[in-house]
Image: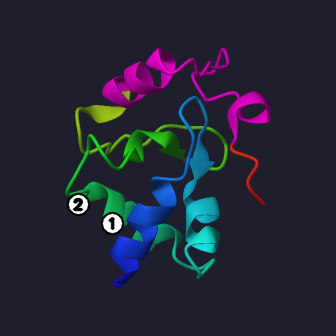
Amino acid sequence: MSSFEIIYETVKLIPKGKVATYGQVATLSGNPKWSRVVGYALHRNPEPGVIPCHRVVMRDGSLSPAFAFGGENRQRELLESEGVEFTGEGKVDMERFRWQNL
């Protein structure tokens, strides 16, 4: 399995209504140094409706300004439709919505 395929399988595990960070996905995919690789993989997501890349955010809860499937506004819409809430600064409330998988 390629590194991208491993990352995609990890991202598929993030439950609806939760988010994970790039670093968290990298660690779960087998290499904590793969944060940027996670970003590259998600930007090339071959199945946006199947691989929920919108559930991956930066460690402070910020959204990706380069979200490949409609921009950060679309990413926010998708997360809000799953019940994810944002702080006054426009970041995901990580205390409430970070996937606690570790």
Q: Secondary structure at mark 2?
A: loop
Q: Does 97 appear in magenta?
A: yes
Calculate the distance from the C-alpha at mark 1 to the C-alpha at mark 2: 6 Å
Quadrant in the picture for residue 25: bottom right
Please report the bounds of the magenta region as a residue range.
73-98
Say whether residue 46 is left or right of residue 18. Answer: left
Pinpoint residue 68: horizontal percent, then vertical percent.
25, 45
Question: Within 10 Å of the Cα at label 1, are there few (<14), some (14-19), or many (20+) other Cα atoms?
Answer: few
Question: Within 10 Å of the Cα at label 2, are there few (<14), some (14-19), or many (20+) other Cα atoms?
Answer: few
Given residues 3 and 72, the one toward you in this image is: 3
| Residue 77's disc number | none
Q: Which quadrant would the C terminus be assigned to in this image?
A: bottom right
Residue type at numbered disc 1: Tyr
| Residue 40's disc number | 1
**102 above or below 72?**
below
Pinpoint residue 1: horizontal percent, then vertical percent.
36, 85
Pinpoint residue 32: horizontal percent, then vertical percent.
63, 77
**98 above or below 11?**
above
Q: Secondary structure at mark 1?
A: helix
Residue at screen point 36% across, 32% down: 72
The answer to whether marks 1 and 2 mark residues whose Cβ atoms lie closer than 8 Å is: yes
Pinpoint residue 30: horizontal percent, then vertical percent.
59, 81
Q: How is the image coloured?
A: rainbow
**83 above or below 27?**
above
The residue beneath circle 2 is 44
Say whether residue 24 is left or right of residue 62. Answer: right
Say whether residue 6 is left or right of residue 40. Answer: right
Residue at screen point 62% across, 38% down: 61
Residue type at numbered disc 2: Arg
Q: Does 95 appear in magenta?
A: yes
